[in-house]
Image (spheres, rainbow, N blue to C red):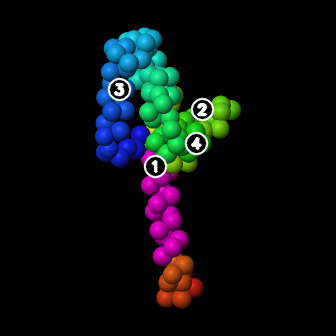
Amino acid sequence: MIVQQTPLTEALLREWAECPSEIKYPGCARWADPSAFWHEQSAYSEYIRHDAAYAREGVLKEIKCDEANGAPENWLRGGKQCRGTLVRHYWVCKQCVRKAVEHSVVDLVVGAGEEGLGRDWEGILVDEAL
């Protein structure tokens, strides 16, 4: 989540934290059990984001699954198309994180090298005798 500190945001976060107490959202107590799969995300998805105070235009903006909830190891095996072009979430394949970091570093280094070569191509000396 990316949030801006406003009274409305503070209320949303407080109500989300209090959701399992059922002060405002009857039925949310089932998400109080931390062993429940995706408990905090489910409390948000099922109750908070549908609350009229937050569901109105411009308050919450959802990002496409393909941009923000990518699990590359899932889509590589034919799962739904959430590639994570902006944010990747390695919830299935924790061991894939290392390779992903390696690839991102290589992409940065190679990209910078290509850019440098392109800018100074005329100034590069090539010894054809080698």
| Residue where numbered disc 3 is placed | 15
| Residue where numbered disc 1 is placed | 102
Query: Residue 38: x percent and y percent?
Result: 46, 22
User: Secondary structure under badge 2?
Assistant: helix
Q: CA distance from mark 3 to mark 1?
A: 40 Å
Identity, as a three-letter code, of the amino acid under mark 3: Glu
Q: Nearer the viewer, mark 3 or mark 2?
A: 3
Q: CA distance from mark 4 to mark 2?
A: 16 Å
Residue 49 image label: none
Picture quarter containing residue 15? top left
Magenta span: predominant SS is: helix
Q: Nearer the viewer, mark 1 or mark 4?
A: 4
- Say above or below: 15 vs 114: above
Query: Residue 72: x percent and y percent?
Result: 57, 38
Identity, as a three-letter code, of the amino acid under mark 1: Glu
Q: Earlier in the sequence, mark 3 or mark 1?
A: 3
Nearest the viewer among 20 and 106 is 20
Q: CA distance from mark 3 to mark 2?
A: 32 Å
Query: Residue 86: x percent and y percent?
Result: 51, 48
Residue 115 part of the magenta segment: yes
